[in-house]
Image (tube, rainbow, N blue to C red):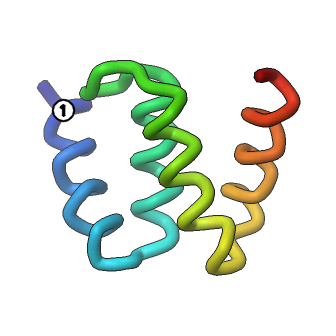
Amino acid sequence: EDQAQAARWYTLGARQGDIHAQNNLALCFLNGWGVAKSAREAVKWFRKSAEQGNAAAQTSLGRCYLGG
């Protein structure tokens, strides 16, 4: 329940353009923390954050592409 609540808050922030919330939401999707696991959604949110200069998201996005 705590992970689901965190994912809901990250979603709110991510939709408003917060790069940290976008990165954290991507991690939730990548790992299935509080949401259904989805590599597609993870990449979507990592990309949004990375395009705004978030180095952690840029690294994670690269790892997603490297790992397939």
Quadrant of the image occupied by residue 3:
top left
Which residue occupies the foreground of this view, 16 or 56? 16
Question: In the image, residue 35 lies at what x, y percent?
Answer: 27, 27
Looking at the image, residue 31 lies above or below residue 14: above
Around disc 1, counting alpha carbons within 10 Å, would you say few (fewer than 14), some (14 to 19), or many (20 or more)? some
- Furthest-right residue in this view: 66
| Amino acid type, residue under disc 1 in the picture | Ala
Tell me the residue at 42%/32% (across/down). 29
Q: Residue at 63% of width from left, 79% of height from top? A: 52
Q: Is residue 67 above or below residue 6?
A: above
User: Whole-percent x and y of residue 60?
Assistant: 72, 44
Q: Measured along the vertical axis of the image, is residue 49 above or below residue 34?
A: below
Q: State which quarter of the image contains the C terminus.
A: top right
- Relative to 8, 33 lies left or right: right
**Residue 48 quadrant:** bottom right
Which residue bears the numbered disc 1? 4
Give how far across and how far down residue 64 sits, in percent.
Answer: 73, 33
Residue at 24 percent of width and 44 percent of height? 6
Q: Position of residue 14 (x, y in %)?
A: 34, 65
The image quadrant where one finds the N terminus is top left
Q: For the image shown, how many numbered marks are present on the structure?
A: 1
| SS at badge 1 | helix
Q: Please indicate whether residue 66 sits to the left or right of residue 43 in the image.
A: right
